[in-house]
Amino acid sequence: MSPIDEDRAAWLQGPALRCETAQQSETAPRLVLLGAPGVGKGTQGDLLHERLGACHLSTGDVLRAAAAHPECELSAAMQAALGYMRRGELVPDSIVWDMVRERTQCLRCAGGFILDGFPRTLTQAQSLRNLMDAEGIALTAVVNYELPAAEIVARLGGRRTCEKCKAVYHVTERPPQVSGVCDRCSGKLFQREDDHPESIKVRLEAYSRSTAPLIDFYKRLGLLVHVSAKGSPEEIFERTVERLSAKI
């Protein structure tokens, strides 16, 4: 297990595990990252973790970690979530919520957290707020990364993934040294099904329908911070830190 994974052991593998002791902090940030597929939430979560020390808690990482373990080692919620994923179906709100709720200790962490991939719907956001109110903790801010749909289609449509090591490239922004071949392991690069323009548009429409009420919810609570996702990851990150400076 890598040092980063050791820091998130309880998040990735469940409440039976314990992470390294977090440094106590009265000002530990507790953030939620919102944004359509392709805006770079995962990259920004990692950069914010490096700068702020708070754990980057991605629900996608939880599901990927679960897929690598025998089902007998998984909770009922995780087994159910994997069942939906393997059938190519969306994991219901109730199952995702059960998965997050059994990791409540991660939300209590003294070092804070950066939630990525949750909440995705208004129901999930309300459930998260109720849990945090019951635990006596509060969100610091909700960062909403914004990028025009045409740019998201171009960004994801040019993405290529190595079939062996899963390294990610882009046909124009980060091309491999040899077209179609991974620099790292010489594996063949391919375009994921959900990175085809038609699939991207469907994903964006679904995101817009489910997230518009979520954005209004956090705006009413005075937590929403809008950040443009244009430019390099470093530029977006500095923009994020600047917008968060008044809240952290």
Image (cartoon, helix red, strand yellow):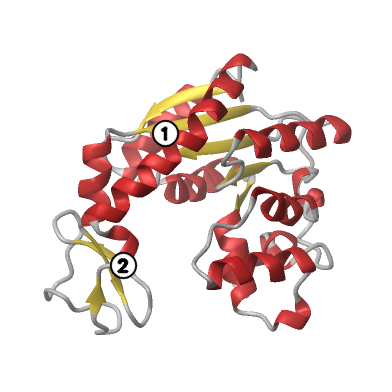
Question: Could you classify mark 2 by the number of other residues whose Cα lies within 10 Å: few (under 14), some (14-19), or many (20 or more)?
Answer: some
Q: Nearer the viewer, residue 244 or 88?
A: 88
Q: Position of residue 212 (x, y in %)?
A: 48, 28
Q: Is residue 238 left or right of residue 168?
A: right
Please name the residue that numbered disc 1 is placed on.
Answer: 145
Give percent across and percent down for residue 214.
56, 29
- Which of the two marks, 1 or 2, is nearer to us in this view? 2
The relative height of residue 242 versus residue 33 in the rendered view (above or below) is above
- Give residue 60's position: percent from left, percent from top: 55, 59
Answer yes or no: is residue 3 visible: no
SS assignment at label 2: loop
Residue bearing mark 2: 192
Quadrant into which the N terminus falls:
bottom right
Q: Secondary structure at mark 1?
A: strand
Q: Residues within 10 Å of mark 1 (few under 14, many from 20)?
A: many
Give the percent coordinates (x, y) of residue 245. 53, 22
Based on the displayed image, in which of its 4 quarters is residue 13 positioned? bottom right
Q: 83 or 49, which lies in front?
A: 83
Marking on residue 52: none
Looking at the rendered structure, the kind of residue marked 1 is Tyr
Query: Does residue 243 appear in the picture of this structure?
Result: yes
**Real-space Cα distance between discs 1 and 2?**
23 Å
Q: In this image, 14 relative to 142: left or right?
A: right
The image shows residue 247, relative to residue 182, as above or below, that is above
Q: Quadrant of residue 129?
A: top right
Q: Quadrant of the C terminus?
A: top right
The residue located at (33%, 79%) in the rendering is 163
- The residue depicted at 66 percent of the width and 80 percent of the height is 69
**Which amino acid lies under the numbered mark 2 shown in the image of this protein?**
Arg
Mark 1 near mark 2, Cβ–Cβ under 8 Å? no
